[in-house]
Image (spheres, coloured by chain):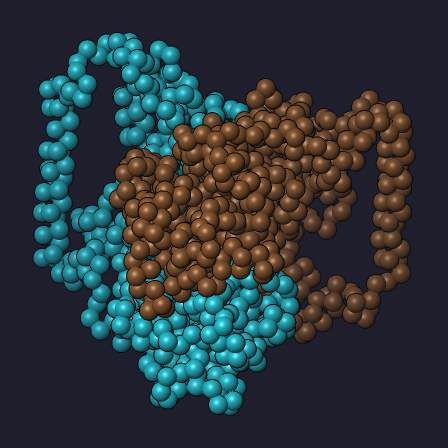
Chain colours: A cyan, B brown
Amino acid sequence: MAMAERFLASKFNKPDFNIVDHYTYGIVSDGDLMEGVSQEAANLAGLLKLGKLIYLYDNNHISIEGRTEIASIEKLRPRFEACGWHVAEVEDGNDLQAIEKAIQEARDETSRPSIIAVRTLIGYGSPNKQDKASAHGEPLGEEELKLTKKNLGWTKEPFLIPDAVLEHFRKALHKGLDSQIKWQRLISEYRRQYPESAELWREWVQERLPEAWVNSMPVFKADEKGIATRSVSGKIINALSPILKNLIGGSADLAPSNKTLIIGEEDFKSPEYKGRNIRYGIREHGMGAFMNGIALHGGLIPFGGTFFVFSDYMRPAIRLASLQKIRVIYVFTHDSIALGEDGPTHQPIEHLASLRAMPGLNLIRPCDANETVEAWKIAIESKGPTALVLTRQDIPVLDRSVFPAASNIAKGAYVLKDAEGTPDCILIGTGSEVHIAIKAAELIESKGVKVRIVNMASWRLFEQQAEEYRKGVLPPSVICRIAVEAGSSFGWERYTGAGGGFVCRDGFGVSAPPEVLYKNFGITPEAVAKTAMNLLSKNKKYTY
Amino acid sequence: MAMAERFLASKFNKPDFNIVDHYTYGIVSDGDLMEGVSQEAANLAGLLKLGKLIYLYDNNHISIEGRTEIASIEKLRPRFEACGWHVAEVEDGNDLQAIEKAIQEARDETSRPSIIAVRTLIGYGSPNKQDKASAHGEPLGEEELKLTKKNLGWTKEPFLIPDAVLEHFRKALHKGLDSQIKWQRLISEYRRQYPESAELWREWVQERLPEAWVNSMPVFKADEKGIATRSVSGKIINALSPILKNLIGGSADLAPSNKTLIIGEEDFKSPEYKGRNIRYGIREHGMGAFMNGIALHGGLIPFGGTFFVFSDYMRPAIRLASLQKIRVIYVFTHDSIALGEDGPTHQPIEHLASLRAMPGLNLIRPCDANETVEAWKIAIESKGPTALVLTRQDIPVLDRSVFPAASNIAKGAYVLKDAEGTPDCILIGTGSEVHIAIKAAELIESKGVKVRIVNMASWRLFEQQAEEYRKGVLPPSVICRIAVEAGSSFGWERYTGAGGGFVCRDGFGVSAPPEVLYKNFGITPEAVAKTAMNLLSKNKKYTY
């Protein structure tokens, strides 16, 4: 959020018009600071000199298992100073003046983020549970609650707010209202003096897109050699960036591989903060969290790239994006064993299944360049997060005068090629394996079998279609259905049905050139054709 | 690994017999140190005073996107000193004497782990690529390779090892052999003087289990109110710990919730290192990595607990355990929306599916106390990692004089209750939802429908059974099959088939008491019965 504030301030503020000008406060706990992602965030925030970022650290020395010293040795001050932070300490969490002073000093820091360690006592005032782990995970209980209130001199009824307290808190409403009015006057005057900037501001915060923005998107001609969809994605980012000036992102140190760099654009860095290339560093979890913050702030469209297999590192952040329905775009490249020699640690297998299973996340695996364009359109127009799953290797660009329009992937799945009449067999492919399905179909057709090819780039979008459409694409009467995907077969029975089959890879990959892997794992047109002929021959008997 | 070394040294070493006595070296890169997990590891290693852990940091200032300064500000020395480490620097990566001296100094540190930052130049000697990012991700190329060799004065053929070099390296073989012989002499003498310890040592490193170890396992009587399977797991850990003295573990600060504490046992800490309760801290990813290290070291059986939803944080480590086929035991408690008020951030939904999809990981979700015992047995005897997925809430203990033996879960799935003759309908449940299936079966039976209940605790184990057994449990002729599970339906079509249905939860959870959630999400015996009756009524028409 502090990153978004700096970028928007640099974009919109004018002399005497600090339209974007806020602090970002975080309340952090002992536990938060033990999680590694806190180090990833601290390092980047320090590098970016986010002076308006202020953490209030609830420093109570207690976690669920007991005193934090049983699990942590680290000293806060050198750890955060090593990352370029201002570190302050408040000895008594009930000393409001000391806290206020520390906050003011933190606000005065212009080029260092601040962490204020406020020493507190968990279960404050409870005679038997104060400063104990039992105050962390459990309620005090009726008896202890009574003792605590007595100890603190609280004689009122439960849930009663005394008038003096109410009055004090209500002041915040007025204060807030005053600030709002002041800001609204400012923006009104800004609108008069800078109408174009004001209009752009409104467009961004209302999440509207400029007219005809899609016209900037590239179109790719049919090409058998083709192009890697990661490269297409790079071209799209660069085509969109002059039109969508709020598109901002980068990679977890894989920009040359993920093709996430906006060419000619500066890095996002201090003190200008106007560049749109974010150097997230080798921190996938942090990157996911930064993107969530940027999206939640509003005004910007964040994207971030890494190898698909490393989506595991950022999974907690992806889940939070899904839960919060925020527009975050993941550029996951090197999407299968086809990445080759880097081997099984880098080759995704179960990642398609495990991310398809996540509620609220739209995963799209386009089969060629023009579908990649459509996938990016969907991601930009989405209200929630989108995972774009892209190849490392070149794949053909389909001839759309022969095949239906690439825009069909907006329906999740569509018939790419059909037989006359009812097909005997349906091949369902995604991404790079659609091309294997196309070649397999020729082999199968040569034996007089009628084949349909379905391209299923996004399960979620397909599941959002009307039942009629879905049954049109995958007619219940066609029992022989084969999924072709260089990843786990897990979940595919949903579409292949009881009489179907797979040409997938359920075990880990190995290190070898992609051609060798596809051949050895049997993900070939010949294997698909063989599976189809076998299934057809035992059709109707095959039910489990 | 350094933790395992300390524990085993404390257990087996005797005066004049340092049977376990080795350093653990790690080679770490700029990228490794940017990943948050490196901070989690540094903090715990410092706290545990692992003086025999030595990192050699390949400090080349270059990552894939360029100089590390574009993404990192942090200073190594204060960061690691804040965690209680010894930090050394070597200015020239080719100065072997300086490196050797630094290593010797690190070895002399008895109570601080060491990091030696060795300044190196990536692509050393290459006239055009040295110290550049291009030397990171790409090969030098033929031309540059020639120039580099020329520059370094290397005139030999490619892949040729000069005699002097060969001789030098071959010395290592002799040195290793000498060390091995010396150690073997030591252990022979040790065996004479301490035969019991020597036998135990052999048992541990050979991964054998003591005779009749399973007899220590608790047995639970039928009980309608029952017990949470997490609590059972806690009893098992405590029953096993006196027999399996190499069982060592803890939780990521959730021991009271995960029930991972070995009662009466000390914490694993400096300087004794003999306790078996590891305080992993609030570091799930780190915990996963520590367990991998302990398992790879050999001699020990590591386990670690957290809430099931936080398995996402440690997913990269789980994947490495699966890939390396190492015995790591995950105690994942709070396994569904039934955890209640903590809400959707804490309620797992897609986690069953996403971990079932991971190659090599065995996930077991037992339906009662005695199955939890069996699940632990399987985990202990396994050659690979096992995820035990356990309830927060009490669930009934089944009467095994009525139902088949709990040991049946070794087959992954089994018929828990059957109808006479061929069933009309099969209910497939896992974990806590097996009990919903049992109640649903009564409702369905009351309408004259013949019901079978299948308990499917582990998909992986079931898939390892012979086809005959699998078809016996789920006969292809029975089309009406319903999966009952408080998690995503993703993947269940594999067993419910084309004519089946689900009573699952595909969206995120919400914060409410468990009873309210089950009712509102329709995971009830009534909903299961209704689904079954609907499916039966449209049977045979239902194919998609």
Please tell me which residue is depicted at 55% across the width and 40% down the height of the picture.
B405
Please, is residue A388 above or below residue B253 in the view?
A: below
User: In this view of the protein, can residue A312 be seen by the observer?
Assistant: no
| Whole-percent x, y for residue A197 in the image | 18, 60
Please tell me which residue is depicted at 76% across the width and 27% down the height of the picture.
B12
Please, is residue B446 above or below residue B238 in the view?
A: below
Please tell me which residue is depicted at 62% across the width and 66% down the height of the picture.
A341
| Whole-percent x, y for residue A377 in the image | 30, 69
- A67 relative position to B202: left or right: left
For the image shown, how many numbered marks are present on the structure? Answer: 0
- B331 relative position to A247: left or right: right
| Whole-percent x, y for residue B200 in the image | 77, 31
Between residue A483 and residue B1, name the one nearer to us.
A483
Q: Quadrant of residue A101?
A: top left
| Whole-percent x, y for residue B348 in the image | 40, 45
- B368 relative position to B299: left or right: left
Please, is residue B71 above or below residue B277 in the view?
A: below
- A197 relative position to B38: left or right: left
Between residue A308 and residue A134, name the one nearer to us.
A134
User: In this view of the protein, can residue B446 be seen by the observer?
Assistant: yes
Between residue A418 and residue B415, name the one nearer to us.
B415
Please tell me which residue is depicted at 36% across the width and 53% down the height of the picture.
B449
Between residue A479 and residue B316, name the one nearer to us.
A479
